[in-house]
Amino acid sequence: MDKERLKQTAAEKAVEEIQPGAIVGLGTGSTVYYVLLALGEKVRDGLNIIGIATSKQTEIISANQGIPLSTLAEHPVIDVTIDGADEIDPSLNLIKGGGGALVREKIIAHASKRLVIVADASKSVSVLGSTFALPVEVLQFGWEATQAAINIICDKSTMRNNGEKPYISDNGNYILDCRFDAIRQPAQVELQLNNLPGVVENGLFVNRADKAIIGTTSGVEIREKTR
Ligand code: 5RP
């Protein structure tokens, strides 16, 4: 089975988590895209939900699918958020932000009663940081100084680009992709990075996900957080 099919299978399973009347956080990325397609179909069939998008990209896709959207100001408590991840460890800690939406994703995850992650099996790792560089969103002001401070924590960071120019997030900031050999103490690294002036947020999601729905070649694997 190809990767797209694995993403789609996981996404379609995840949509079963959404109850009528729910306020639903809508993540960002190529796996969430399939969530939005499946949810859009249910909405057009009469499912009554309100979505809160984590990115401009998700806002556009959701609107095209006919999914009603609102804001965190209107709905500060979200029933369930479905989002993707770049890496998932055995404790359901995550690296996110490959799609550049980590700040809004973390705000929405924090406002959610439940966070359900959808992914294909390639995202499953034993230790975070082993396959994917950790995205860190930084202010444009003084970003070189912020990068120098970040480089004391990680092995090496690179500016994310969009063609010839720096990539600009939905919040108007830069993203530095930070390589680690491995992130063995993700809670500590999350705090250390966020303690640096100029860092807006980083893509470590520690102790936030409640469930991961993972598309594998032998079917959908469900992992629940152990409390
Ligand atoms: C966006 C994210 C995405 O959820 C993450 O990058 C996974 O994306 P994809 O499903 O396309 O692999 O964190 O900021």
Image: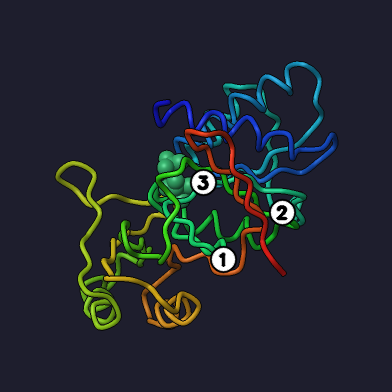
Instruction: Kindly give the residue lying farthest to the front in the view shown.
Output: 218
As shown in the figure, which amino acid type bears the numbered disc 3? Gly
Nearest the viewer among 106 and 204 is 204
| Quarter of the rendering containing residue 21 | top right
The answer, for residue 33, to whether it is visible in the render is yes
Could you classify mark 1 by the number of other residues whose Cα lies within 10 Å: few (under 14), some (14-19), or many (20 or more)? some
Q: Mark 2 points at which residue?
A: 73
Nearest the viewer among 165 and 184 is 184
For residue 84, which numbered disc appears in the image? 3
Nearest the viewer among 50 and 132 is 132
Q: Does the residue labelled 3 lie within 8 Å of ligand 1?
A: yes
Mark 2 vs mark 1: which is more N-terminal?
2
Q: Distance between the residues labelled 3 and 1?
A: 16 Å
Could you classify mark 3 by the number of other residues whose Cα lies within 10 Å: few (under 14), some (14-19), or many (20 or more)? many
Mark 3 vs mark 1: which is more N-terminal?
3
As shown in the figure, which amino acid type bears the numbered disc 2? Ala
Q: What element carries label 1?
A: loop
Q: Which residue is drawn at 32% across and 57% down?
A: 132
Q: What element carries label 3?
A: loop
x and y percentages locating residue 45 in the rendered image = 77, 16
Quadrant assignment for the N terminus: top left
Please identify, in this view, whether the residue under mark 3 or under mark 1 is nearer the observer. Answer: 1
Using residue 5 as the reference point, say whether residue 109 is left or right of it.
Answer: right
Q: Is mark 2 on a helix, strand or loop?
A: loop
Q: How far apart are marks 2 and 1 (CA)?
A: 31 Å
Instruction: Kindly give the residue lying farthest to the top in the view shown.
Output: 45
As shown in the figure, which amino acid type bears the numbered disc 1? Ser
Q: Name the residue under label 1.
A: 91
Instruction: Kindly give the residue lying farthest to the right in the view shown.
Output: 21
Using residue 74 as the reference point, say whether residue 135 is left or right of it.
Answer: left
Quadrant assignment for the C terminus: bottom right
